[in-house]
Image (cartoon, rainbow, N blue to C red):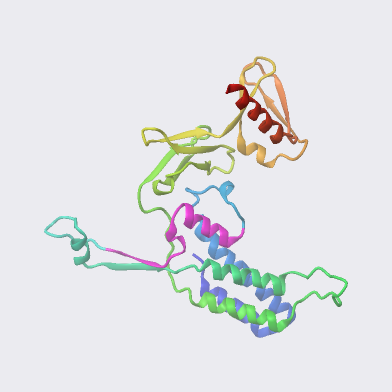
Amino acid sequence: MLDIPKRIKLINSLLEQDTEQSLTYAALECRLTLEYLCYERFKLYFSYLSESDLKNWQPKHIIKQISDEIDENVSKEFSISVSSEKIDGRLPETKEEFESIKYTPLGTQSELKFNKLHQLWNGLSNVALHIPVPSISSGDLKIYGDKDNIRKKISDVVSFLSGMKGNLLMGGVLGEEYGFNCFVCDTKIKRPVRNLQYQTIVSCINPECQESYVIQKNKNDEFEVIRAIIKFSCSGCNEDLEVPIRVFRDLRLNQVLSIHCGKCNMLSEVIMRPLVKSTEAEHSHNKELQRTSR
């Protein structure tokens, strides 16, 4: 867990130097600290959310996605306490019995206000960590930003960090989970059941694996897992060639994907090219079919 007081001490020491260089360095230390606060919480949920499923790389959006798809407690403040007390020699069973025994506090997770964090993170970049692109109306180029603006943003970050008083972080999900092993690498993949009420696409959490899956409910209201693939026919033996959909994410225009058939060892090549489809022609054809059927 990040030592926030230590980070604040470092940032303040750079503030006290009060040079353009030290303030710029302090802004960088602030931004890195904000990123760390988000990423250390993301790391607690590696077993639930693949990096490949992240919709946005910015720290705020990562925390929000975890909150929406995995565990809303990732950014909330809460305290954890434990007890070994029993009632008449047995464990408590009812809410009233649990509330009646004594507990020993373990610690508190501090709230992570990710919208405010993002505002500060972005603001530091604007005033200190980028040189503005020059225009016809701009003056001379400057390496460093305005000292007063940088100092104000840094002070805002220090104030934000000073409000985080927690001494623990907790990952994981409270409630029922659904899990299965990757069909290819056997890595465990799991998600909270409460977030699987609609069709969901999940990727294998193994960074070396390209597999992804569709999780949906069947007619019996049971979960079924479907491998997300695209099928091709081998030109040598007509065997089905199955390629994970994720393989195509990184292909560029006209890039060639080579596929070896495991049955006849024939090499097939798939070229990434645009597909033109005339929706108007299809619409006219459907209208003609409707007239014919009457």
Nearest the viewer among 182 and 55 is 55
Q: In the rendered image, which quarter contains the C terminus? A: top right
Q: Which residues are magenta?
A: 58-82
Against 128, is 55 above or below? above
In x, y percent, where is residue 211? 56, 37
* Residue furthest front in the image: 294
Residue 182: give x, y in percent of width and height: 49, 36
Above or below, 128 against 293 in this view is: below
One can see residue 85 in this view: no
| Marker count (numbered) | 0
Whether residue 230 appears in magenta in the rendering, the answer is no
Q: Residue at x 56, y 77 (%)?
A: 8
Quick check: is 60 in the magenta stretch?
yes
Is residue 236 left or right of 80 when viewed as pictured? right
Q: Which image quadrant for residue 170?
A: bottom left
Left or right: 199 with respect to 250? left
Residue 161 position in % (x across, y down): 53, 74
The answer, for residue 152, to whether it is visible in the render is yes
Figure quadrant of residue 99: bottom left
**Residue 190 in the image: x percent, y percent?**
44, 44
Query: In the current view of this chain or complex, which residue is farthest to the top?
Result: 237
Task: Determine the main secondary structure of the stretch shown in magenta.
Answer: helix
Decide: is 203 above or below 183. below
Residue drawn at x 19%, y 66% is 100
Residue at (46, 34) in percent of width and height: 225
